[in-house]
Image (cartoon, rainbow, N blue to C red):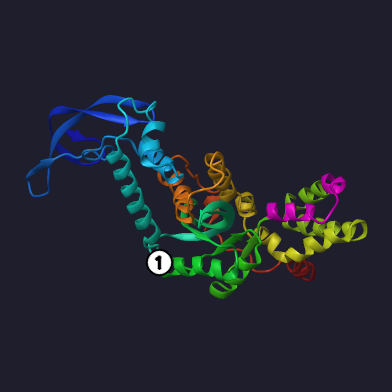
């Protein structure tokens, strides 16, 4: 036997049956047996990479059991709730083993080294969830950090349950990333929270920061009556989604001039964001779609809240963070590469668009 592409040489010697339980129920599979030749001429038993030794459940099945437990259901109720899916039932020892494995994996993931991660961009945002603290329903913040590798692949780096989105809370998250070996990023995308801005200034001053254009769009609505929302949206989108840096800057001036006269609070809100709302224009246009917003995290937030919508209050702050992580760790949610990943190696333009235009005019 020779395994294509791997260089392994050996011979098969039968197979063994195994029962595997997944979200599809329980099925019988046949696992091949083989001996492969080692470097020193001896042979060793071949091990499947797809199916671990003694594995009896798929990762998705374990995630389902763990999610039910994390959501506040006790062992007995987990067994009863999943009986329809797992025809032979789920014993309390299975629930306990799955829970211990998930907790062990979570601890290892939370403390893992990031020194070897080729992270070039970070996306940072927070979401509010309700948990039970001292028998009372309490709102806490889950602070989430996504990284973008040099090849464009998004990866979850950190989830921390905190009391809010203060500068101190975000500083705790960023300090933990640095302690674990994360290198200085080249670009940051944030939701615009003042606490996060303060934390970033303390640890990564000088790194280009993009303020989420979707968050600012919503913020503009808070400064105007509802009858003006459609008009604000039309003008805002006309500016943000213009084709070139120069067009964006020109329409920015038009937006401010118009709304200063029509409803000054809207113009003031846009000006409050400053140039950080347009940092994405310093990147190649192919990256603009992925660099304008924190939508990558927003989509995770939406999926997380959809999964827990029947749980008005989660049992604890720790399990809230673990549930969020488990959605990705179990493969229930997959993250694709960012748009424009092929040009991630291109450095951001240093000069703001308005100054570049003046320089070009003088040279002409």
Q: Is 141 one of the magenta-colored residues? A: no
Q: Position of residue 31 (x, y in %)?
A: 21, 30
> Is residue 207 shown left or right of residue 48?
right
220 magenta-colored? yes
**Quarter in which the C terminus is drawn:** bottom right
Query: Which part of the image, by quadrant, shows the N terminus?
Result: top left
For mark 1, give the secondary structure: loop
**For the point 31% across and 26% down, which residue is it?**
26
Across and down, in percent, residue 141 comes to 56, 57
Q: Residue at x 56, y 47 (%)?
A: 301
Identify the magenta region: 213-231
Q: Magenta span: helix, strand or loop, mainly?
A: helix
Instruction: Using the image, determine if residue 240 lies above or below residue 10.
Output: below
Can residue 339 be seen at all in this image of the molecule? no
User: How far from the left and from the top, in percent, is residue 344?
Assistant: 53, 56
Q: Residue furthest right?
A: 261
**Viewer-side residue, 346 vs 229:** 229
Q: Is residue 60 left or right of residue 223?
A: left
Q: Number of callouts in the render? A: 1
Q: Which residue is mark 1?
A: 180
The answer to which of 34 and 179 lies nearer the viewer is 179
Q: Residue at x 16, y 28 (%)?
A: 16
**Residue at image location 40% in from the left, 36% down from the top:** 77
Residue 19 placement, left or right of 271:
left
Q: Is residue 39 visible?
A: yes
């Amino acid at each position: 036997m020779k395994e294509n592409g791997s260089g392994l040489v050996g011979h098969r010697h039968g197979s063994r049956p195994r029962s595997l339980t997944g979200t599809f129920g329980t099925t019988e599979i046949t696992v091949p047996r083989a001996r492969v030749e080692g470097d020193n001429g001896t042979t060793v038993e071949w091990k499947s990479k797809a199916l671990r030794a003694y594995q009896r459940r798929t990762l998705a099945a374990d995630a389902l059991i763990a999610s039910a437990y994390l959501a506040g259901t006790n062992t007995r109720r987990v067994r009863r709730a999943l009986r329809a899916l797992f025809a032979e039932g789920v014993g309390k020892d299975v629930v306990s083993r799955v829970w211990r494995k998930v907790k062990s994996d979570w601890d290892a993931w939370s403390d893992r080294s990031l020194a070897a991660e080729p992270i070039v961009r970070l996306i940072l945002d927070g979401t509010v969830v309700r948990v039970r603290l001292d028998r009372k329903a309490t709102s806490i913040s889950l602070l989430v950090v996504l990284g973008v590798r040099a090849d464009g692949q998004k990866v979850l780096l950190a989830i921390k349950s905190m009391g809010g989105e203060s500068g101190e809370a975000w500083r705790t998250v960023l300090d933990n990333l640095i302690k674990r070996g994360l290198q200085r990023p080249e670009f940051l995308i944030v939701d615009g929270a003042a606490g996060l801005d303060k934390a970033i200034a303390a640890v990564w001053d000088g790194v280009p920061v993009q303020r989420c254009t979707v968050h600012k769009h919503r913020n503009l609505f808070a400064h105007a009556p509802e009858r003006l929302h459609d008009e604000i949206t039309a003008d805002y989108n006309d500016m943000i989604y213009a084709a070139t840096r120069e067009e964006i800057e020109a329409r920015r001036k038009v937006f401010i001039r118009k709304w200063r006269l029509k409803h000054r609070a809207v113009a003031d809100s846009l000006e409050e964001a400053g140039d950080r709302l347009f940092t994405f224009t310093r990147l190649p246009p192919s990256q603009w779609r992925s660099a304008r917003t924190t939508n990558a995290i927003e989509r995770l937030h939406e999926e997380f809240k959809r999964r827990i919508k029947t749980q008005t209050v989660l049992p604890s702050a720790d399990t809230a963070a673990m549930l969020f992580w488990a959605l990705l760790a179990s493969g229930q949610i997959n993250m694709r590469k960012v748009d424009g990943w092929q040009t991630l190696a291109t450095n951001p333009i240093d000069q703001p668009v308005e100054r570049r235009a003046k320089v070009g005019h003088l040279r002409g």
